[in-house]
Image (cartoon, rainbow, N blue to C red):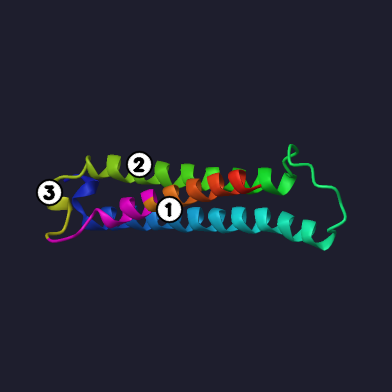
Amino acid sequence: MSYLDDPRVLFASERTLLAWQRTSISLIGLGFVVERFGLFMRSLNPQAPINPNLLGPSLVFGVLFLLIAAMVALLSAWQFKRFLKELSEKEIPRGHVLWPGPVINIILAVAALSMATWFVVTS
């Protein structure tokens, strides 16, 4: 009897996927806050000259966090799908839906990449 014969292994894998989703959401939030903090700091000193060719550190770090969030979301979805291929039919409970977790991760990745693009284009 394989250790994978227990459906708890699948559920543990889903919990791991959800933990990576939370990490990705946190990184997206952090990237947004960091980038918007730079905008807030510029609004405090409106007389300061703004050089459009110079990317501020808040933009760079904010976009970096967003790109890392997208990478984490995509990597965890890929890893979960790869794990599912290792399971047999009897290890997956009948009627259990497996697609929402990876789809949500892909949506998170698209959202993070869209935000990063928006920040770069509008700055």
What mark, if any, has residue 108 been given in the picture?
1
Q: Nearer the viewer, mark 3 or mark 2?
A: 2
Task: Please check the rendered image and state whether residue 97 is part of the magenta-colored stretch, yes or no.
Answer: yes
Indicate the secondary structure of the residue bearing disc 1. helix
- Real-space CA distance between mark 3 and mark 1, rounded to the nearest whole angstrom: 29 Å
- Real-space CA distance between mark 3 and mark 2, rounded to the nearest whole angstrom: 19 Å
Compared across the picture, whether 16 is left or right of 11 comes to: right
102, 114: nearer the viewer: 114
81, 93: nearer the viewer: 81
Compared across the picture, whether 34 is left or right of 71 comes to: right
Crowding at mark 3 (Cα within 10 Å: few <14, some 14-19, many 20+): few
What mark, if any, has residue 89 been given in the picture?
3
Image quadrant where residue 45 sits: bottom right
Residue highlighted by disc 2: 79
Residue in the picture at 35% in, 55% down: 104
Residue in the picture at 29% in, 39% down: 82
What amino acid type is highlighted by mark number 1? Leu
Image quadrant where residue 96 sits: bottom left
103, 75: nearer the viewer: 103
Task: Please check the rendered image and state whether residue 123 is part of the magenta-colored stretch, yes or no.
Answer: no
